[in-house]
Image: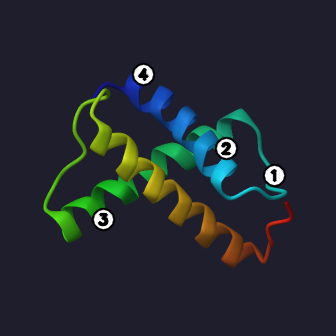
Amino acid sequence: MGIIAWIVLGLIVGAIAKAIMPGKDGGGLIITMLLGVVGGFVGGIIGKALFGVDIGGFFEIRTWLLAILGAVIVLGIYRLVTGRKSHA
């Protein structure tokens, strides 16, 4: 995937992760995008280690599912480190 695809994927996946785990997280568009991009990398590592699959192309479902899983994990770790709790 190209850099633009990673940015778009990161923005959408970061927003989905924040919707799955609502709370008072700082940051705006850039932080949400970074959350999704880092989540994509983490999801790729998890996918390779556990399932033996890599992140595929932009329109592949496994790419999206692994990126969302990774972003939720990254957001959870961020909240553990900063001590923030989710307040729905």
Circle 1 packing at 10 Å, graded few (<14), some (14-19), many (20+), is few
Which residue, as the protein is rendered here, is positioned at the far left? Answer: 52
Name the kind of residue labelled 3 in the image: Ile
What's the CA distance linking mark 4 and mark 2?
Answer: 16 Å
Residue displayed at 79% across by 55% down: 25
Q: Nearer the viewer, residue 45 or 19?
A: 19
Residue displayed at 65% across by 67% down: 78
Circle 2 packing at 10 Å, graded few (<14), some (14-19), many (20+), is some
Of callouts 4 and 1, the N-terminal one: 4
Residue displayed at 86% across by 65% down: 87
Q: Quadrant of residue 14?
A: top right
For label 3, the residue is 46
Image mark for residue 31: 2
Tell whether label 2 touches label 1 (CB within 8 Å).
yes
State how many labels appear: 4
Image mark for residue 75: none
Under circle 4, the secondary element is helix
Say which of marks 1 and 3 sits in front: 3
Name the kind of residue labelled 1 in the image: Gly
Image mark for residue 26: 1
| Residue 55 point in image, percent of width and height | 25, 45
Name the kind of residue labelled 2 in the image: Ile
Tell whether label 2 touches label 4 (CB within 8 Å).
no
Of callouts 4 and 2, the N-terminal one: 4
Tell whether label 4 touches label 3 (CB within 8 Å).
no
Lateral position of residue 51 relative to residue 38, left or right: left
Of callouts 1 and 3, the N-terminal one: 1
Identify whether 65 is placed above or below 88. above
Tell whether label 1 touches label 4 (CB within 8 Å).
no
Image mark for residue 4: 4
Q: Nearer the viewer, residue 61 or 1?
A: 61
Under circle 3, the secondary element is helix
